[in-house]
Image: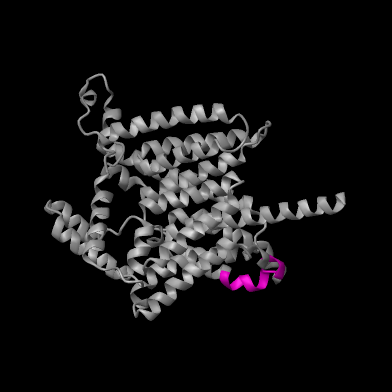
Amino acid sequence: MRILLSAIYPYIFLLLYLILPFDNYIRALPNILLIILAVAFPLVVKQSDFKKLKSFPVLLFFLLVLFLFLNSTFSGRLGEDIGVIGKVFITLGLAVLYIPVNDVEKIKYAVVFSSLAAIAYSLYHFVLITHDLGYFVLGDSPQVVEALLIDRVYLGMLSVFSILISIQGIKKQYHPLNNYHLGNIIINFVFILLIASRIALVALLILILLRQFYGKRRIWKFVLAGISALALTGFLLVLKNKNNQWLKSDKIPKVVVDFVENSRTYELRTTVWSCAGEVMKKNDIPLNGLGFKTTEAKLVECYAENIENPIKREEFLSLKYNTHNQFLDFYLGAGVLAPVLFIVFILGSLIISRQQYFPTAMIVLLVWYCLVENVFHRQIGSYYIGLIMLAILIAVGMRGEKSRDTSKSESFRY
């Protein structure tokens, strides 16, 4: 029985990340798979596997989860905050459940295939909607948003993950899989442009710049990265500027005009962050925070008082937008110690992973998305942050193997 479970356990883990983008349609399945993994875990795990958890970042993340739980319990609001705390715990749980898995490449490919499946699904519905409308739309239009399989933020994040995995998978020498990885990079990049996910585009720019610190010929890499940065920055400035006269030119294709005009969605986050600032001004944030539910209520009050446009105010009140910044959310919801623990976890992970591009890039992505999104307010967000935790664990394991190899070579030398 144990041998059979050990054989299928990695495939259950693989299936979890493969079906994750379809969470809205099969919401219970990821949770069912997680329960199956938890039940099978004691039967397949070995004592040696627990060495993977002996790392500074995992300890810090465990302290963060423990603090959130105890802080909420002693503040008498565990029932209100358990939704957010539970999602943070899922991330830690995935790291623990991962340790019996040895073939991590299959999990990476599951992420790649899930990204392609999500793109295929979204494009199929996009074509149907375009056929019904009789014209082509791009960017933030309701038609595009309706066609997407999941929220654009997380679909963009998934595409960035997929691109990053393919970048790491391309070999310097000829390899048959290189063409597939290159094709995957192109498909995901074009899709990010199609849905006008500026958060994902900025993430890719950051990853390109970060990549220049690894490998040889760094001067030419920095020149190329600088040109890319200037081009993308100019493009984003065009998107931000609402008075572009050149858009009114008849020489500009309508597709391009629609892409630029439909891509100005800065108002949501600026409004939310402004209200978060108002909440901090009007309330003395205690050491144990206001609570995640209370923070949401305070933001809703701010929307009702400060948003003049009735249509916009009704949207913000009905959707109850959160802080759209995980650091702010931790501070307002659980006090100053929560974001401090989270930041120390990130810094510790960067120190351990700094010599390897892939895990470092994953941690940088974590920082970027936490700056613009409450990743622990959505189940899919906690699962994808769990993927970043896996990258950190792999980096810790590789570092341990390298140190053991070094010590062996030194002992041989002597």
> Can residue 150 be seen here?
no
Q: Relative to 119, is 170 on the left or the right?
A: right
Q: Where 161 sits versus 251, above or below?
A: below
Task: Pick the residue in front: 185 or 29.
Answer: 185
Instruction: Tell me the residue at 45%/27% (across/down).
Output: 227
Q: Where 224 sits versus 332, above or below?
A: above
> Percent x, y for residue 184?
52, 38
Magenta span: predominant SS is: helix
Query: Per the image, is 41 magenta?
Result: yes
> Percent x, y for residue 170?
61, 37
Colour scheme in the image? one colour
Task: Pick the residue in front: 190 or 84.
Answer: 84
> Percent x, y for residue 223?
50, 27
Q: Relative to 251, is 408 on the left or the right?
A: right
View extreme (top): residue: 251
Q: Relative to 246, is 3 on the left or the right?
A: right
Q: What stretch is highlighted in magenta?
A: 38-49
Asked where in the image residue 141 lies, by quadrant, the reply is top left
Q: Which corner quadrant holds the N terminus?
A: bottom right
Task: Pick the residue in front: 336 or 243.
Answer: 336
Instruction: Tell me the residue at 78%/54% (across/down).
Output: 407
Task: Pick the residue in front: 388 or 251.
Answer: 388
> Percent x, y for residue 175?
67, 34
Instruction: Tell me the residue at 63%/60% (across/down).
Output: 10
